[in-house]
């Protein structure tokens, strides 16, 4: 099938020039990104059902080739289930650093078309090309040019959608995707452009679950109302949605069902939080071991904050217990923190104040309330409960540690820049394999089968922790 045929637009107007309401928001989505990078770097994997993710009992699928998708494998699926569906799959632990490198190349390629690029994760981005239409042509022509450049410069494939809004553009890129088959992927449209006059005919047949803000709970409520498609949703009076979902959410979904999405493309969207979490090979009940893990994660978060020139005021811990229940605890201090010692003081205080009726399956530490590292301090108020008092002690300790460790941390950063991250670290980082600084790990999707490393476990190999979603910075 010719490239032009595979990239034919959906309902593009034949009117020459740039008409009013031209679908100038593009969504670029890489095809099976992590898996595609692995195949690109190791051509022997071409044509095979490749799964990137943790291959152990607690691993999850991060990405997979279309050959694996043909067997029903998909991202976020438990690796055990994926192996059942596709026993001959090739599992790859993944290389996060490599994916980040390719993602940076992708952003550079996209910015050659417009400076208005809003990355979403590593493998997708929104573009506002209104100012580039006269230079590069129609949205369809720009989308096709992007696909060629990504193929030429990165050796990878992407799908492009265009519309008057971000939501329509994202749904259009999904419609442009290849389809899975055991012999390899079946090429899709490549580029799908939704013309303004055909937005509703494009949108209304789709499942309501594809709308932004429709999670499992909302989907169930809508199903109870007889709503299954976006068209069904558009047919409901807005008052019914408001009664069922609340004023803000009901009105928001009613607008989306009409195709009304006014959210702009925001380049350089500021990072809102930075976090590090790990899934353990075995549940951990020993609080001392959990504290050491929390301190390691605090160091990871602090290092990333310093790298982006930010401090954070709100420390949050996430605890997933052995029964899969999740507990989160947060505390806000009066000054910005960016040292592992300071963040760790609050994180361990939060952990001490959390009841743990069973072993811990996953532990995470994150920072929000980010501000520039030079920002000033703000006073905080502490309630009089015992738990609040305990946290107040941790917060006061954190402020002291932030000041005392500032110069030490600067020296540690300088040593690591010159000699590598494993050159120096805190006691919590020391294990049988030496100093291990938690960062963007190569296998952040749960333990692999052969992961026998132990870290920070009071001298014994107890947890064999593997990063799940390490040092991630989220902006949405």
Image (tube, rainbow, N blue to C red):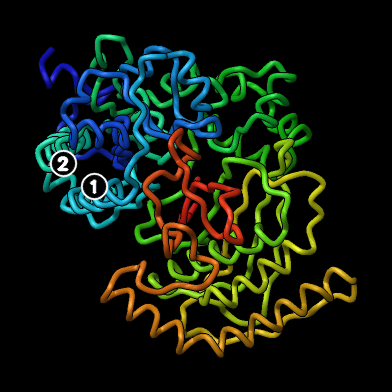
Give the number of marks.
2
Rendered image quadrant of residue 420: bottom left
Label 2 vs 1, first from the N-terminus: 1
The residue under the point 20% across, 40% down is 18
Q: Nearer the viewer, residue 75 or 204?
A: 75
Q: Is residue 365 visible?
A: no
Q: Secondary structure at mark 1?
A: helix
Q: In this figure, which residue is indicated by the disc labeled 1?
A: 102
Indicate whether 195 appears above or below 372. above
Q: Position of residue 383 (x, y in %)?
A: 85, 75
Q: Position of residue 313 (x, y in %)?
A: 61, 73
The residue under the point 34% across, 33% down is 92
Rendered image quadrant of residue 160: top left
The residue under the point 14% across, 46% down is 134
Q: Is residue 357 visible?
A: yes
Give the left or right position of residue 295, taking residue 181 as reference. right
Q: Nearer the viewer, residue 1 or 241?
A: 1
Q: Position of residue 173 (x, y in %)?
A: 33, 30
Q: Secondary structure at mark 2?
A: helix
Q: Quadrant of the N terminus?
A: top left
Q: Nearer the viewer, residue 126 or 426?
A: 426
* Mark 2 touches mark 1? (CB < 8 Å): yes
Give the left or right position of residue 326, taking residue 93 as reference. right
Q: In this figure, which residue is indicated by the disc labeled 2?
A: 154
């Amino acid at each position: 099938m010719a490239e032009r045929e595979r990239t034919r637009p959906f309902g593009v107007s034949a009117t020459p020039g740039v008409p009013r309401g031209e679908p100038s928001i593009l969504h670029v989505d890489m095809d099976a990104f992590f898996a595609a990078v692995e195949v690109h770097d190791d051509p022997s994997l071409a044509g095979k059902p490749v799964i990137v993710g943790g291959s152990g009992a607690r691993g999850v699928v991060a990405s997979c080739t279309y050959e694996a998708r043909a067997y029903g494998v998909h991202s976020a699926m438990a690796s055990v289930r994926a192996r059942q569906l596709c026993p001959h799959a090739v599992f790859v632990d993944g290389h996060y650093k490599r994916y980040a490198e390719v993602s940076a190349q992708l952003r550079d390629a996209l910015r050659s078309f417009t400076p208005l690029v809003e990355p979403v994760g590593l493998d997708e981005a929104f573009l506002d090309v209104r100012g580039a239409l006269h230079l590069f042509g129609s949205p369809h022509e720009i989308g096709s040019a992007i696909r060629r450049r990504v193929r030429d410069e990165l050796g990878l494939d992407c799908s492009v959608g265009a519309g008057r809004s971000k939501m329509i553009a994202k749904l259009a890129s999904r419609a442009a995707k290849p389809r899975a088959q055991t012999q390899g992927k079946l090429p899709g449209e490549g580029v799908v452009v939704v013309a303004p006059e055909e937005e509703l005919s494009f949108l209304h047949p789709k499942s309501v679950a594809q709308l932004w803000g429709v999670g499992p709970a909302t989907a169930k409520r809508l199903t109870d109302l007889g709503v299954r498609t976006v068209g069904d949703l558009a047919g409901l009076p807005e008052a019914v949605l408001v009664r069922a979902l609340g004023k803000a959410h009901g009105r928001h979904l009613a607008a989306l069902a009409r195709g009304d999405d006014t959210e702009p493309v925001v380049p350089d969207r500021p990072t809102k939080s930075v976090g590090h979490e790990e899934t353990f090979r075995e549940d951990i009940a020993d609080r001392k071991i959990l504290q050491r893990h929390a301190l390691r994660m605090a160091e990871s978060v602090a290092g990333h904050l310093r790298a982006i020139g930010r401090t954070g005021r709100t420390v949050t811990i996430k605890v997933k217990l052995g029964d899969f229940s999740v507990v989160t605890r947060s505390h806000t201090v009066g000054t910005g923190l960016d040292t592992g010692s300071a963040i760790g003081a609050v994180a361990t205080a939060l952990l001490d104040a959390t009841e743990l009726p069973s072993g811990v399956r996953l532990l995470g530490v994150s920072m929000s309330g980010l501000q520039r590292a030079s920002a000033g301090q703000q006073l905080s108020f502490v309630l009089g409960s015992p738990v609040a008092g305990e946290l107040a002690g941790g917060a006061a300790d954190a402020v002291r540690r932030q000041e005392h460790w500032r110069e030490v941390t600067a020296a540690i950063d300088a040593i690591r820049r010159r000699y590598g991250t494993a050159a120096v670290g805190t006691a919590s980082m020391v294990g049988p394999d030496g100093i291990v600084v938690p960062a963007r790990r190569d296998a952040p999707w749960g333990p692999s089968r052969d992961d026998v490393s132990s870290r920070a476990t009071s001298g014994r190999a107890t947890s064999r922790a593997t990063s799940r979603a390490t040092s991630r910075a989220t902006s949405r």
